[in-house]
Every structure is written in C-alpha cells, then in structure tokens.
RNA sequence: GCCGAUAUAGUUUAGUGGUAAAACAGAUCCUUGGUAAGGAUCAGCGGACAGUUCAAUUCUGUCUUUCGGCACCA
C-alpha cells in the first residue's frame, strides 16, 4: 500500500484535502473548532471539536458532497504571512488554534495561514494552487481522538480520509484496503478453523482449535529447538503467583492496572501472572551460582494473563491470555554485549526462516524526566543504554531511538511489524535489566570468591506464539508453508470406488512417515473435493487415478499452482520432507 | 477505559411491529468422476435482560460481543 507521507506531491495534496475537509465541516457545522489536520501514512485526518454535535459515519457522504462542491468552485489557495499578534487576532475565536499560536516563537518560525474562499486555516503549508486540484478523495472513517493524544484531555472527533491525483489510484487504494481485510488473521482464523472465541468464555480469551493448535505446537517446537541449540534451559512454572512476589519485583507498583485483580485465599493474595520474570528470578535464586556457570539462560513457553483494556483486544494478536516465548539470561557485566548480540542474531535468524523482511527496530530509552516510571539510577541507565546502542551499531542494524518507551527496569530493543489491519506492534524484544537482579538480591561468586550481582536480559523472539501466528497468517494469507500447515497433503482418489484402496495405501504410507495427511475418499466429484482442498489452503494435493494406480505413482499439485507432477511415492516423500525440514 | 458503529442458521448475508429468507457448509438419497460448484429431500436462526405494545427479531433502555479509531501496550 502507498505511504502517502513518503511522497512529497501526495503529502501536499492530502494536506490540502484536510483543509478542504475542514472547510466543508465548517459550512455544515458552523460551531466547529479545529485542532490539527496532518498527513499520515494512510492519508490525512482532521481533529475537530463540534461541541455536542456528533458526526456519524453516514454523515461522511454529506461532507464529501460539500467538499466536491467547494472543489468545483475552484477557489485559489492563498498563503498569508502573519505576525504573532495578527495570528492571535485572526483565530481569536478558536481556542485550539490559539493554543498552537501561543506556543510558536516568531523568531524561529514564520507564522502563516492559508485562505481558500471563506475559509482560512493556520498552516505552515505548502498547499496545491487551487481547491480544484483536490478531486479524487474519500473520507474513510470517523472516530474519537483525545486532544493532544492525552486520555485526560477532551475527546475530539477525528475524520480520516485519503486523496489521490487520479481516480484509478484512489480505486486501487480502496481495493487494497478491501484485500487487507481478507488477510486479517481473525478472518483467516475463522475460515481455516484455527481458533475461536466465545462470549461465555470471555473477551480476549481465544481458544485454539485442532488446526490452530498444530500450527502453535510447530512454532513451539521450532523455537525451543533453536534455543536448546544455543544453550537455553527450559522450565515450566505456574501461571499464578503470590502478590508478594510482584511487590518484590516492582510489577505491583508499575503494572497493577494491567493485571487481573488479586484472588484472596486463606489470608493470602494471588494473581494470574502477567509475565514470568519473577518466577525465573526465583529459579535463579534457588541455588548459588559460580561465574563459571554464567550465562544461564532460562526459557519457557509461558502462559500469561493481562487485563488488556477492552478496546485493545484483537484476535490472537492481543488477548488477555497468551503464551510468551520468554527467556531470561543471567549474565555478568562483561557478557552483556555478547549475549545481547546473540539474541539479536537469533531474532534475525528466525526472521530469515519465516521470510520476515518488513520490520522496524526501535531502541526504547527511558525519559530521564520521568522519575516516577523509571528506576532513578542515572549511571545504570546510561551504561545500559550505551551498551545496547553500541551492539546495534556494531551489527550495522538500522534503528530509531524512542524516548520514554523503555520498561521501568531498563532499556530495550523492540522489533516492530505492521499487521494487515491496525497499528504496528512489537514482535520481538530484548530488554536489559540491572534492576530486578538487585531487587531479588541475585548473586554469583566471581573469580575472587566474592559475591556479585548478575545482569538480566529479558527476551522474547516470537514475542507471543499467538501474536506471531497472527503475523505469519497475515503474511502468508493463510497459505502456510508445509511445515506449519495443519494438513500437509490431501489425498484424492479420482474415483473412490476404483482407486480408494490405492489412495488408502498412499495415505497410510505418508502417515507412517509422520506427514499430516488427509484422505478425502468421500463420494463427491473430484472437482468438488479439489476445491475444498484449495479453500483449506492445503499445500499439496495428490490426485490418484487409474494411471497412478497401475504405475504405482502419484500425481501432485501444489497449492495455488496449475501444473501436476507425477512421481513415485518415495520421490514425493523425499521432496516433501526436504521442504518441511528446510521450512520452505 | 473513551468515541462511533455492530449483533439474524455452522459461515456469509437479506428482510420484517403479526415468530423469518437465500447461498455455501451439514445429513440422506440419486447421479457423476482427471483438476474450483450435478440434482432431490431434510434439518438448522433473532446476544442477554428490561421497557413500550394486543403483538417486538424489528422501537426504546441497560449490559455484553464484535468492528473502526483514540488512549494503553514488559
């Protein structure tokens, strides 16, 4: 999909369209006060205060009509440069614009406004020459948005739209939006019977069906095997913990509002755990460690529960229960860089296996001014942040730095991706932590026989298996590679009556070899059964007729391909196993 | 949590102040058989709770779900 923000011409056009939108809104709703109307990757929006008037989706058509009318009038868009005083006077009845103007420094910026007919808006520009140029646009949605992005502020109404230079581009974009919906993991999950949810079980608590659980298990086995080879030790710990544990870790202070409330039993309080760090800390603390044992890498596919805001839950991408591909690495200060590097290498090794190329690395740092959220130890933070920065630079990884995005206990590297529908999210993460080891008084004995505090790296490669599965589904449009497919081969006798026995032999042969095979010998037409295999996105279809039966061969066809290849069953097995092994 | 929308069969949708329709999926039977839809018959539906009404799936309210955003996101 086109990124409007990256195209200079389209940016100007879209921003001009935002002004056109504001003008139309002002015509239809004279009470309207305007905040800002920036260009975004997906077009533009305008945040508007309409008092008690509510713009509904059905009103968008009306607004579009007004926009088209204004556009036809073809007024010129004229820039006016203003002194701060003039600007304050010009927008004296719009508190939002006044807020903007008051914060401007005349000596640093030229304050300007753009006028088109009866409408004038504070704006740095540039804009197109006349409103006539703004022709091919569409208002997409309307929603609430907090003023200045702060939930404590008033909620304004935001109208989203997009504009192009010609009708074809606009239609293509609208078509792409429709297509994105088709690969939304929630739709695929339903169509392919991967997971479900039920009101009675509860919101944000998806359940994996047999097909989905196969994919899930394959992911689990895959990552555990990778980790095992890298010296990780896997553990299993309970999903519930004493509240005291979380008070000790600091999560109770910093994370309570995202946890299910405590359960009081016999004078004790327990919580469903939102993460596994404290459990793993206790495992480390359960015995004395030598420097020779470090790094110690404790991994777990761990069930976690977070009370996500009701508006935040989304399929298996963000649920209130999920399974983290979690691990905690206990290392000496000297090992931080090499272990961090190992984690980064693992992340990109995995991405290579899954063909993930559309990601964005973010180095999340603390906001030094936020003393409440962040553990106040400047030296610790500076060291931690510098070490991560150094490794990323050494590895030549492109990243951006974001202030105030760090965890309360330390800085982190996040690897973010964008789903088919919705906002970017974090897939993988690696976090450096000097804080928890101190809180739990973790120790190891160094060369000189003295006690030292280790450093902890928290890391999740697949993030959560659930979220990772959502991403892979959207990337593959549900046509999973053979190694992940719930059913790998569909065996189709042309006529079950005549080749059914042969199909059974082939099916058993593959089944014996550990292939997930489905024999479809229902007395339906071949075309019908073939179609079903197609819609279930099964990677291989075997067609067995008299020819194959006589020659003791099989004919296979790949998902999405037209051609059929005839080989012996052993040849097919070799090909299939090779494909599964290489995760193609 | 906030703003807006939404809820009808397993799925996707239609329709209505007088108890509901279609397609696909399912079952049975017939038919057929080489690369995406043969036929017949059958079975299956109103999120929950209130209110208005002679009568509510339809109108109203509350809650819940889901969806689009915002905020949140270790």
Image (tube, rainbow, N blue to C red):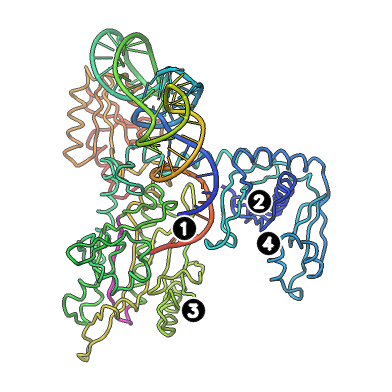
Badge 1 or badge 3: first in the primary sequence:
1
Query: CA gap, disc 4 to disc 2?
Result: 12 Å
Where are the magenta residues, as a range?
A323-335
Residues at discs 1 and 2 both on one chain: yes
| A91 is higher (above) or lower (below) than A510 | below
Taking the spot 47% from the left edge, 47% from the top edge, the residue there is: A420
Q: Mark 4 points at which residue?
A: A96
Query: CA gap, disc 4 to disc 1?
Result: 36 Å
* Secondary element at tag 2: loop
Taking the spot 61% from the left edge, 46% from the top edge, the residue there is: A54
Q: Name the residue under label 1.
A: A359
Q: Does residue A383 appear in the picture of this structure? A: yes
Q: Of the residues tagged 4 and 2, which is closer to the observer?
A: 2
Badge 3 or badge 2: first in the primary sequence:
2
Badge 4 or badge 2: first in the primary sequence:
2
Q: Name the residue under label 3.
A: A368
Q: Does residue A579 appear in the picture of this structure? A: no
What's the chain of the residue with tag 4?
A
């Amino acid at each position: 999909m086109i990124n409007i923000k990256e195209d200079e011409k389209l940016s100007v056009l879209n921003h001009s369209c935002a002004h056109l939108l504001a003008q139309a809104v002002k015509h239809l709703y004279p009470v309207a006060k305007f905040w800002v109307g920036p260009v975004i990757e997906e077009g533009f929006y305008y945040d508007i205060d309409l008092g008690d008037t509510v713009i509904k989706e059905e009103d968008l058509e009306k607004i579009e009509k007004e926009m088209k009318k204004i556009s036809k009038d073809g007024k010129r868009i004229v820039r006016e440069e203003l002194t701060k005083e003039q600007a304050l006077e010009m927008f004296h009845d719009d508190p939002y614009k006044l807020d903007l103007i008051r914060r401007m420094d005349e000596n640093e910026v030229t304050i300007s406004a753009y006028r088109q007919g009866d409408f004038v808006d504070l704006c740095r520009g540039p804009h197109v020459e006349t409103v006539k140029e703004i022709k091919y646009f569409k208002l997409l949605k309307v929603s609430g948005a907090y003023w200045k992005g702060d939930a404590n502020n008033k909620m304004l109404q935001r109208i989203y739209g997009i504009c192009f230079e010609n009708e074809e581009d606009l239609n293509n974009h609208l078509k792409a939006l429709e297509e994105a919906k088709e690969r939304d993991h929630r739709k695929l999950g339903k169509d392919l019977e991967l997971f479900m949810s039920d009101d009675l079980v509860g919101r944000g608590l998806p359940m994996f069906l047999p097909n989905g659980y196969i994919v899930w298990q394959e992911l689990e086995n895959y990552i555990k095997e990778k980790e095992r080879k890298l010296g990780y030790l896997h553990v299993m710990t309970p999903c519930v913990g004493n509240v005291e544990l979380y008070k000790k870790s600091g999560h109770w202070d910093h994370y309570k509002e995202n946890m299910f409330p405590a359960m009081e039993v016999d004078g004790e309080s327990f919580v469903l755990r939102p993460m596994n760090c404290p459990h793993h800390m206790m495992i480390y603390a359960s015995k004395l460690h030598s420097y020779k044992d470090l790094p110690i890498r404790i991994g777990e596919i761990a069930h976690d529960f977070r009370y996500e805001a009701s508006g935040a839950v989304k399929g298996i991408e963000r649920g209130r229960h999920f399974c983290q591909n979690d691990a905690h690495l206990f290392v000496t200060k000297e090992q931080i860089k090499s272990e961090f590097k190992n984690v980064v290498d693992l992340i990109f090794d995995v991405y290579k296996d899954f063909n993930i190329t559309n990601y964005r690395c973010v180095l999340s740092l603390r906001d030094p001014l936020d003393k409440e959220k962040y553990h106040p130890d400047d030296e610790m933070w500076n060291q931690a942040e510098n070490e991560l920065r150094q490794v990323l630079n050494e590895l030549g990884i492109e990243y951006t730095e974001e202030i105030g995005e760090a965890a309360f206990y330390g800085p982190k590297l996040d690897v973010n991706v964008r789903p088919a529908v919705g906002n970017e999210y974090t897939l993988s993460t690696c976090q450096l932590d000097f804080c928890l080891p101190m809180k739990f008084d973790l120790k190891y004995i160094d060369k000189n026989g003295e006690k030292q505090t280790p450093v902890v790296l928290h890391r999740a490669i697949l993030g959560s298996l659930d979220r990772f599965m959502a991403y892979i589904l959207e990337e593959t449009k549900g046509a999973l590679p053979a190694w992940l497919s719930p059913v790998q081969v569909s065996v189709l006798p042309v006529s079950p009556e005549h080749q059914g026995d042969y199909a059974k032999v082939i099916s058993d042969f593959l089944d014996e070899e550990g292939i997930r095979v489905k024999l479809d010998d229902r007395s339906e037409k071949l075309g019908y059964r073939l179609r079903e295999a197609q819609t279930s996105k099964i990677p291989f279809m075997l067609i067995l007729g008299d020819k194959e039966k006589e020659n003791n061969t099989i004919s296979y066809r790949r998902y999405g391909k037209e051609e059929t290849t005839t080989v012996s069953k052993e040849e097919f097995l070799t090909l299939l196993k090779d494909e599964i092994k290489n995760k193609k």
